[in-house]
Image (cartoon, grey):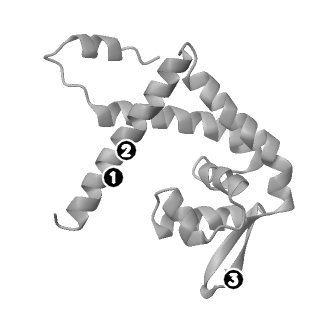
Amino acid sequence: MHSSWNIRLKSSKTHVSMGRESALLSREINVFLARELEPYGIGSGQFPFLMRLMHHDGISQESLTKALNCDRATGTRALNKLEEKGYVRRETDPRDKRAYCVFLTERSRLLEPAIKSISSQINDVVFRGFTDEEKTLFLSMINRATDNISAENDARKAGI
């Protein structure tokens, strides 16, 4: 169990590494996901794609990768794996013949309750012992931090 956070916060002389702490949380969530998804042949990297498609079935592949903040190559690899397993299908976008729309298959629809249950379990575990106010604050702070670093990355990419 990772318990050094309280100690580091109390000491103003100790450097708190946001990157390290967020990487640890992400890694532990991915370990949990990998274990839960293994019986279905789905990797933790494909999980966000399925979750997004459960709410936005038929979205363009480009919109899907943008919504998940990943590059085209990563999105293509994840979707190729899901397609090979029979969880998604891609069809040419009728509005743009060079693009694809991504759809869940019947097989993934049958898994939807299990996938949503896994998502709920993650939240239950991560937020164990949190008050509703703490959950809201935590998510708000993560979103703000993500927006901050995203804006900085965009500015640096643009040469600003």
Left or right: 105 as drawn, with respect to 84: right
Q: Quadrant of residue 105?
A: bottom right
Tally the numbered discs. 3
Residue nearest the viewer, comparing 84 with 102: 102
Which label belongs to residue 97? Answer: none
Within the image, what quadrant is residue 35 found in?
Answer: top right
As drawn, which residue projects farthest toward the bottom? Answer: 97
Q: In the image, which disc is placed on residue 146?
A: 2
- Within-10-Å neighbours for mark 3: few <14, some 14–19, many 20+: few
The residue sitting at 54% across, 34% down in the picture is 29
Figure check: 76 above or below 99: above
The x and y percentages for residue 140 are 43, 33
**What residue is disc 1 on?**
150
Q: Write the residue at 62% across / 71% down.
A: 60
Q: Amino acid at mark 3?
A: Thr
* CA distance separating discs 3 and 1: 31 Å
Residue at position x 47%, y 32% in the image = 139
Q: Which residue corresponds to mark 3?
A: 92
- In the rendered structure, are the residues bearing label 3 and label 1 in contact, judged by CB atoms less than 8 Å apart? no
Q: Are marks 3 and 2 in contact (CB under 8 Å)?
A: no
Whole-angstrom CA distance, mark 3 to mark 2, is: 33 Å
Mark 2 surroundings: few (<14), some (14-19) or many (≥20) residues within 10 A: few
Q: Helix, strand or loop at disc 1?
A: helix
Q: Amino acid at mark 1?
A: Ser
